[in-house]
Amino acid sequence: MSLTARKLNREFYLRPTLDVARDLIGKYLVFKTGGKVLSARLVEVEAYIGENDPACHAAVGRTDRNGVMYGPGGYSYVYFIYGMYHCLNVVTENEGFPAAVLIRGAEPVEGVEIMLSQFDNKKNNGLTSGPGKLCKAFGLSRKHNGLDLVGDILFIEDRGFRPARIENSSRIGIKKAVEKKWRFYEAGSNYVSIRNK
């Protein structure tokens, strides 16, 4: 871990979601588990903003599943899809306004051997490119839903890295609001799940 690492504070997450999403690129996701530390540099994210965003889980209103989105920014929102994948989101903005940033891809930094052990194929080919693979590599599941990202278990750090270029595009795998270019990614990263969308 860098000596200049600084954990992101609550105020970072309470800002407008698109600002948070763009600023997350180049930050480091850190998970402390079983005395070990896993970390990866974020290279791809997507923003989902409010009940008026038809691609957002909050478009159907508040439910047991998406309830954490209605809380204050700076908490994890982990959900299960297709009966096989977990997805990690970072809740943003103020309490009562449901918004979050989906973590789509990251470049492994610490604990790579532990991440590899989660998979049958032990090769580091796109190990954490894609939200499902990222959660599997980190061992994240629904039990990690609602964690305080300002706490000491799962959090995000600024280690001083600044991407040379950040690009944006339409979000991946949705059929509604496809015109919104709310996906941000580090240009040239091998851990971006899909390029040039």
Image (cartoon, rainbow, N blue to C red):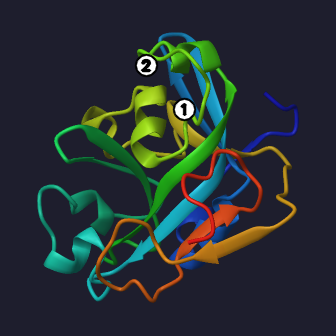
Looking at the image, do the residues carrying marks 1 and 2 touch, with CB atoms under 8 Å apart?
Answer: no
Asked where in the image residue 127 lies, by quadrant, the reply is top right
Q: Secondary structure at mark 2?
A: loop
Q: Amino acid at mark 2?
A: Phe
Count of all numbered marks drawn on residues in the image: 2
Q: Is residue 141 above or below residue 184?
A: above
Name which residue lies at 29% across and 89% down.
52
Q: Nearer the viewer, residue 110 or 175?
A: 175
Residue 194 spot, x, y in % from top left: 55, 58
Q: Which mark is residue 163?
A: none
Residue 5 spot, x, y in % from top left: 79, 39
* Quadrant that contains the C terminus: bottom right
Q: Nearer the viewer, mark 1 or mark 2?
A: 2
Residue 75 spot, x, y in % from top left: 42, 52
Q: Secondary structure at mark 1?
A: loop
Query: What's the distance in space between the residues labelled 1 and 2, CA to CA?
Result: 26 Å
Q: Amino acid at mark 1?
A: Asp
Badge 2 density bin: few <14, some 14–19, many ≥20, Cα 10 Å: some
Residue 67 spot, x, y in % from top left: 21, 61
Q: Nearer the viewer, residue 23 or 43?
A: 43
Asked where in the image residue 176 lies, by quadrant, the reply is bottom left
Name which residue lies at 60% across and 13% down.
113
Q: Nearer the viewer, residue 137 or 22?
A: 137
On the image, numbered disc 1 is attached to which residue? 152
Dot 1 or dot 2, earlier in sequence? 2
Badge 1 density bin: few <14, some 14–19, many ≥20, Cα 10 Å: few
On the image, numbered disc 2 is attached to which residue? 119
Residue 147 located left or right of residue 113: left
Q: Is residue 154 above or below residue 160?
A: above
